[in-house]
Amino acid sequence: MTNNSPIILVDGSSYLYRAFFACPPLTNANGEPTGATYGVINMLKSLLNKYKPSHIAVVFDAKGGSFRHQLYSEYKATREAMPTDLVKQIDPIHTIIKAMGLPLLCVEGVEADDVIGTLAMQAVKAGKDVLISTGDKDMAQLVNQHVTLINTMNNVILKPENVIEKFGVPPALIIDYLALMGDKSDNIPGVPGIGEKTAAAILSHFSGIKDLYARIDEVSQLPIRGAKSLKEKLLTHHADAELSYQLATIKTDLDLHLSIDEINIQPADNAMLNTLFEYNGFKRWLIELAHDKFIHLTTNESTLKAERSENNVSNHNDTTHCLLSLTRIENGYQTILTESELDRWLAQLSSADILAFDTETTSLDHYSAQLVGISFCAEPGKAAYIPVGHDYIDAPDQLAIDLVISKIKPLLENEKILKIGQNLKYDCSVMANYGIDVKAIAFDTMLESYVIDSNGRHDMDTMAMKYLNHKTITYNDLTKSGKKQLPISQIDIETTTQYAAEDADVTLQLHQTLWPKLKHQPQLAEIFTAIEMPLVPILAKMERNGVLIDSNLLKSYSNELALKLTQLEQDMFVLAGEEFNPNSPKQLQKILFENLKLPILKKTPKGDPSTSEEVLTELALDFALPQLILTYRGLAKLKNTYTDKLPLMVSEKDHRIHTNYNQTGTVTGRLSSTDPNLQNIPVRNEEGRRIRQAFIAPKGYKIVSADYSQIELRIMAHLSKDQGLLDAFNKNKDIHRVTAAETLGIAEDQVTTEQRRSAKAVNFGLIYGMSAFGLAKQLGIPRQEAQSYIDRYFKRYPGIAIYMEETRQQATEEGYVKTVSGRRLYLPSIKSSRAMERKAAERAAINAPMQGTAADIIKTAMINIAEFIKQQAKDDIRLLMQVHDELIFEVKEEKVAQLKPQIQHIMENCYPLSIPLHVDIGVGDNWDQAH
């Protein structure tokens, strides 16, 4: 044997089912299923790359029954037939394994377990260690000091001590354990009424079932629950236990006509693999194959070269088994540990037109993150990782970070070399921490995926599987150690190289796959190149600007809220007649519906009375306690989310808060933010305004807030072309007053405050698909009156009704709606057979074009504003935040009068609609004053 790796025996039959149910239902260009094929080969590939064996066998069950069926006709009789889509993939899986050069065994009359057991015992007798890859618990009986099990799906290892820990019995008693408890999956009967715990407890007192039945009278005295009835069960089912013992025993003495030395790896048929991968659509593996990195094995290279030259591929084509071959593949990922290696790589990268890069850091917080390493890729399948911050024991010497920064700075700031990344904003911000201003930020694969279809996930792992049929090494794969998660700086550099370089490589390949899809749809390509990508450095700059926070004000307000919450609790307890936890649904169910007998408006899927916010809101119209509960929850949320946490988020570097803006967080194109979430701070109540007062201007500056007024209604006017709405906006009238007057048939100057409020509820409610029932609840009027109001509204504004109906039809026919810019907003549930889902999708179809267009407008405004800011003197004006339809600035006091109208002009003229955009703009010492 050519190395010290263990002999690996793979339970191929176990792999089949695990891969089929774990992997997505992939298909090739012909519509044939390939998910299980991908899963099985990927698990084998991972196993080979990790252990680099010289000897391996992949063992499958042969067609037909085994000797166990002759012993017991009901053996495995309860198993469902193999799914048709899995049956179709067995031959392709075998073919690829053969082309890989792996010995593949199928032995008639026995099962894969028996073949593996026999080979394992052969190896042990020869003094070799064995690793069995399986998910089958029966195999635990084979474990000893030289035989280990590995579950490839979760990398759980079973050595003798682990078997005891998992099953409660040592490997030598696994057969007895199975004989007692049976095995439902194989329809092994066992002794009815004895489960895992009882079987383990019995065997802790006996050396096996033979000893158990020899001392059967002692069973009644065992300190086991139900011991007195155990004896009778065991005696009644003695024959079943004996039969189960035979069925569960793995044979280890088959005559295979094959020695352990013959299962050595042979050269692969790369031409065949290329054909097979191309047919199945395994693009990632085609690239790996082309770059000699499909599998990396440490074998005797000279032997393999000789074998290749002689084309010496062993094939045993008898009915018992077939042995095949595998070649040694070079790995295309390189670790850079010396200055000369770095210089060589940078020379190559500097001549590239486009490159992908990715950072590994100490934190997800872009503003405080420190570099652990950086990876580059300019050619698919070939990438390098430069470690600078791995600090585990025995970590090799790494290049000094100052040296690396000085050398990569010219590359990343080169405007002629286009940069690709996955969530590039984060990587650019990390580079900014080291004084690097990344230029030519051209493609973000996350945004390419998002613009193509905003639904679903846009992380690299998901996209790699979706677009490249490739399962990446995940961050958890890399850093999870048992129940702990280690920092990446503690992971060995060789392993991290495979992860980090793969990230850069996959990013490049994703771009090469996604960009052609975008280019074929000019409107989407325009949204990507003119809106989403230009926004990346702007958001990065905003995040780094941060916003100044008055922590003392927040702490003081937090104390006030604590007192209010305590008083609210006491008031609630008085109304309820007892103390309870207002955040506990079970306790609320008891208080509201059992004690107070309030009406049950809705039930949970389990049939319990619902205490959702929607239910409480409706109950609050008539009952005091639900209203107090809602008030309590709202204040508690403000306290926990903002007044308590915001001071803890203030950066020690500049005493500011630095949020994170997410361009792919909503399906409509709107931005979202986290840590903190700025979009959820209430604006219409005193409590929310108090929090906004803590967002302050530094000395010598003012906060300027510029907010688009009624933007979605204006977009509705543009999209619906309703003449009534267009006239009102073009004449700069109060749209809600106009709506009230037109709908009620009265003069505008006769509209009361209450009538205007009702009209406002209708105007905004219809955008969000509000029904007559919803309007009635909001206005506190009868449903018929609300329906009458809506009918009059549509009669006065017929263009809106037509637009809404046409939009529903378009969404149903095409599966998506579009913004004014052409951004597509897909609606997966628009044809759902479930009425509730379909209706929700129809409501979204009406609203999405308006929300999406509003997003396009404010993003365009931000891009134009950013250009304007570049023309001003340094630090005269900074863009700090974007919240819904509002931009918040920090402006020097003496510049406010000059810059304020210019900001307003840019925002009102950045996007062409058939009616004018209007921006309300305010100034103050804090956000609340400015808004």
Image (cartoon, grey):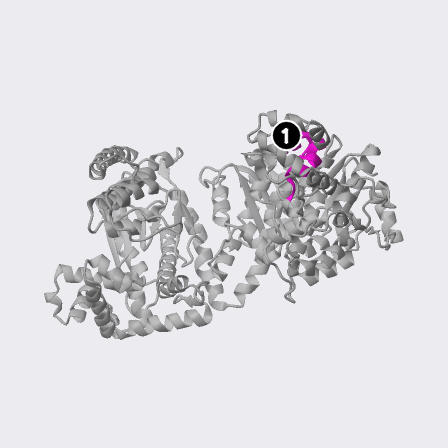
Pointer 1: residues within 10 angstroms few (<14), some, or many (20+)? many
Front in this rendered view, residue 704 or 715: 715
- Residue 346: give x, y in percent of width and height: 63, 46
Q: Amino acid at mark 1?
A: Ile
Q: Tell me if residue 400 comes above or below residue 595 in the rendering.
A: above
Q: Main secondary structure of the magenta part?
A: helix
Q: Is residue 473 left or right of residue 97?
A: left
For residue 236: magenta? no
Q: Which residue lies under the disc numbered 1?
A: 202
Residue 230 appears in view: yes
Residue furthest to the right in view is: 310
Is residue 416 or residue 794 the one in the foreground?
A: 794
Picture coordinates of residue 681, whole percent (x, y): 30, 46
Instruction: Name the residue located 40 percent from the left edge and 45 percent from the top edge.
Output: 674
Q: Give the magenta part as a residue range.
A: 158-183
Image quarter where the N terminus lies is top right
Left or right of residue 909, residue 88 in this image: right
The part of the image, by quadrant, that contains residue 515 is bottom right
Query: Can residue 418 be seen at all in this image of the molecule?
Result: no
- Residue 809 is drawn in which quadrant? bottom left
Residue 491 location, x and y as percent?
60, 35
Q: Nearer the viewer, residue 704 or 424?
A: 424
Q: Is residue 169 magenta?
A: yes
Asked if 269 appears above or below 653 in the picture, the reply is below
Toward the left, the furthest residue is 750
Q: Is residue 242 left or right of residue 761?
A: right
